[in-house]
Image: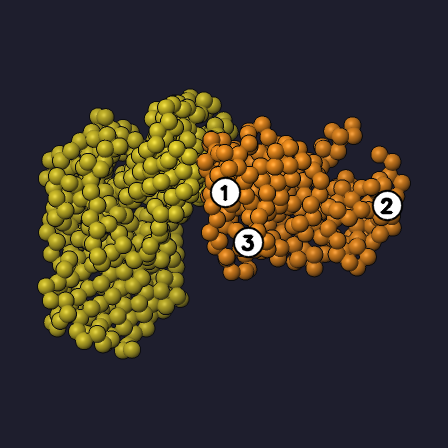
Amino acid sequence: MSRTLETAAQPADLKRVVIEPVTRVEGHGKVTILLDEANRIHQVRLHIVEFRGFEKFIQGRPYWEVPVMVQRLCGICPVSHHLAAGKAVDMLVGARKLTPPAEKLRRLLHVGQMLQSHALHFFHLSSPDLLFGFDSDVASRNVIGVIAAHPELAVQGVKLRKYGQEVIRHITGKRVHGVAAIPGGMNKALKVEERDLMLRDIGQVIEWSRAAVALSRQVFEASEEHRHHFGVFPSNFMSLAGPAGELEFYDGALRARDAQGTALFDQVDYTHYNRFIREEVKPWSYMKFPFIISEGSENGWYRVGPLARVNNCDSITTPLAEAERRSFREAAGGGMQHASLAYHWARMIEMLHAAEEIERLLNDPDILGTDLVTKGERALEGIGVIEAPRGTLFHHYRINEHDVIEKANLIVSTTNNNQAMNEAVRQVAARYLDGKTLTEGLLNHIEVAIRAYDPCLSCATHALGRMPLQVELVDAGGELVDRLVKDADGGLSCGEA
Amino acid sequence: MDHTKTFFLDGQEIPFKEGQTVFDAAMTAGVYIPHLCHNPDYEPHSSCRLCTVIVNGRPFAACTQPAVAGQMIQNDTPELREMRRTLTQMLFVEGNHYCPACEKSGHCKLQATAYDLGLQDNHFPQFFPKREVDATHPDFVLDRDRCILCGHCVRVSRDVDRKCVFAMTHRGIKTEIVVDSPTGLLKDSQLTVEDEAANVCPVGALMLKRKGFQVPIGERPYDQAPIRVDSVKNFKVREERRHG
């Protein structure tokens, strides 16, 4: 777990290649690469250059506003922010244990979110790379290309996502940025007709999810590169886990394992997270670098998200997903899987679990319950931790006696994966770009690596070819010597400035 | 009610009773006139000018303009709609109105009026004023960012509650709500949850604490019906309550 290629010894003597922006939808990032005269790579960094400022501008706002306000952090997984903040706010009103209907509604909402986000991530954003090749024709390397070449598969992806969004809509009133979690519970009971409508299609959703697991596995296992070379590096893994070590998205306790699968900590109450996790600040990025305190900042960084969760858990509570988890672990020889592209396979196993869990919850009589709010002894500090689609998400708030936020700390999934994404980008750049002439296809390898972790940094590049991308090759003296531009229409142009 | 006299509103004959305003007669007849500072339960104020109508070629506030027999009045014209849109846009830019995270969303007259007028954007540059949020009261939050200076709280606290908790201070663009208390803070004022002024804010400026977002999307007043339908319906209910 070294930090090779993070900082070059003599950066002033090197050429600088900048990929900017990598995205502009849910985050704004760039990749910088420093090369010597022989085009050997000396430094690679993924920078998250966008400054959102949520932690600052929610200060002074009433705490009951926070679950609604912070979900605007994201358009893909707003439910995760809504629920993480909701859990934190529950603590503020002394409601650590919700009523059964409220908790089950939140779980249903969360697995609906997981289903739609995972479907979006795999089918809409990543499948073009996986189905057509990383350096295939950029004009068709997008979801429209998938629709043209694999119409049945594309329709399944779209409908899977739509189903997840409908689950969200039934509970929150809107597909995106609705409202459901209030301090101590939920604001609306599920109606019988809403439940029945969701039950009507869940069998098909489970079947499509099974097929998606098979496809993701097939794509991964078919490629020697995917399995053994592309973004493969050892790391620690962190996630929530249930009391029996089972896969857990909504609640549970923190668990971390090292690259060999040895426990670093387990069943840690997430309200004590800051005794185990610390964030390091680096001058070249707005995004912090969290690490496990006991391992130190050099070796304590970790991965979160589907790969971490499936690697970390001892079981999955639904039968079809559990069978797939066992296959996944067997494919890794029973140990930890370290390939970045295995994220997609793990993601589809989770999507299958989400679908099965939706069916289980819809058949639970409590899901129609109307006892939705509870309260207890008021507190001035609240912490909510949840497994968002892309990984562990921490919301931590402190309020004053007037009910307004004094301090907020958010550690989002992307931040938890910051070092890991940097490692992936470095490994891929060193293997595929070292000494090569720049092409869009080669640069896409870097984006494929980022995309495995976080579509919030990649979705725009698959937005029907409309993501402008500019890569510049600058010589050691700072002179622009080469430039490749993808314009808003997806057309490519190049040449010296 | 003995409706013996009429005027014409956009060509429609509207009956009225002596002493009624153009606004009241129109709403009684089921014709909506956009308004923000007027609440039919209280004396009209005519400060927002959203209810401006053209009477015999001249602009008047419908909420204070007495109905006169035979008058030709324009209400729903492209020019008046544009004027109302502009006034509403100005309200949005001179405050800090963030509907996506506001607990008044779906209950808010400013938001509902904006939808009714077809506001697509704020048009004018945002002022981003720095205004104080007073959350010191155990039961209320006074969020001046959302205040549109309609004066409801001022008038109702003074005229109904007889407390004068609120007042306007400064002039022009610097006008703001102040609280009558030794510290200027709400916690030291006489405001209580029983006060009528506690429930009259048409926007999210004066809100009861810990009540936000309890009404689900789909069940909020303006989810059920647009403001032009909701206002007329409520006006009729009020008239029936008052006059039987």
Mark 2 against mark 1, which lies toward the viewer?
1
The location of residue A307, given as percent across then percent down, is 22, 42
Give the left or right position of residue B242, taking residue A223 as reference: right
Q: Chain of mark 3?
A: B
- The residues tagged by marks 2 and 3 sit, at their Cα atoms, a distance apart of 42 Å
Q: Which residue is mark 2?
A: B6
Query: Chain B shown in which color?
Result: orange
Residue A320 falls in image quadrant: top left
Q: Chain of mark 2?
A: B
Residue type at mark 2: give it. Thr
- The residues tagged by marks 2 and 1 sit, at their Cα atoms, a distance apart of 43 Å
Q: Is residue A62 visible?
A: yes
Q: Secondary structure at mark 1?
A: strand
Give the left or right position of residue B109, taking residue A415 as reference: right
Give the left or right position of residue B79, taking residue A266 as reference: right
Using a 10 Å C-alpha cutoff, classify the residue at mark 1 as few (fewer than 14 neighbours), some (14 to 19) or many (20 or more).
many
Q: Is residue A148 visible?
A: no
Q: Is residue A490 above or below residue B142?
A: below
The location of residue A175, given as percent across then percent down, is 45, 42
Residue at 11% across, 67% down: A10
Q: Secondary structure at mark 2?
A: strand
Q: Earlier in the sequence, mark 2 or mark 1?
A: 2
The quarter of the image holding the C terminus of chain A is bottom left
Of residues B220 and B7, which is closer to you in this image? Answer: B7
Q: Which residue is mark 3?
A: B174
